[in-house]
């Protein structure tokens, strides 16, 4: 044989099947969900009607506590990490 026992081969085949099932379920889930954000560069209007830009979370000001929970000011913690 190729150096693997039949049990090892069976386990590997089961893992491959499980991975394919997971990938298929993820693809089906993504296909049914509406996108939460528009892709970058996507026009903000459809058929001439402008769409408002809405924030998911309120804007964090520099002197407020950091939302990551570190206890530091936002400007000293995660401000530079923003995209």
Image (cartoon, rainbow, N blue to C red):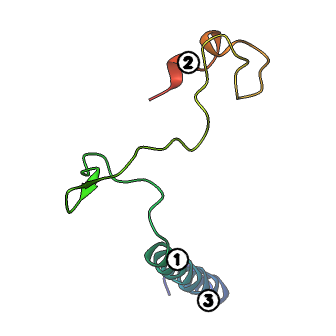
Label 2 or label 3, whichever lies nearer to me, is: 2
Q: Secondary structure at mark 1?
A: helix
Q: Depth check: 73 or 29 in front?
A: 73
The residue identified by callout 3 is 10
Question: Observer-nearest residue: 66 or 55?
Answer: 55
Between 54 and 79, the one nearer to me in the picture: 54
Q: Is residue 7 left or right of residue 32?
A: right
Q: Position of residue 15 (x, y in %)?
A: 60, 80
Secondary element at image label 3: helix
**Vertical placement of residue 69 versus 44, above or below:** above
37 sits to left or right of 19: left
> Which residue is tagged 2?
79
Please state, as top left, top right, bottom left or bottom right, where the C terminus lies in the image: top left
Read off the residue under disc 1.
Answer: 29
| Residue at 47 percent of width and 72 percent of height | 30
Residue at left offset 60%, top offset 18% = 61
Give the residue displayed 58% in from the left and 28% down from the top. 59
Q: Position of residue 60 (x, y in %)?
A: 61, 24
Mark 1 neighbour class, 10 Å CA radius: few under 14, some 14 to 19, many 20 or more: few
């Amino acid at each position: 044989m190729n150096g693997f026992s039949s049990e090892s081969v069976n386990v590997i085949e089961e893992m491959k099947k499980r991975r394919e099932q997971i990938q298929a379920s993820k693809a089906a889930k993504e296909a049914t969900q509406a996108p939460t954000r528009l892709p970058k560069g996507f026009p903000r209007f459809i058929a001439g009607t402008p769409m408002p830009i809405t924030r998911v979370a309120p804007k964090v000001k520099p002197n407020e506590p950091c939302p990551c929970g570190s206890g530091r000011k936002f400007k000293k913690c995660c401000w530079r990490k923003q995209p």
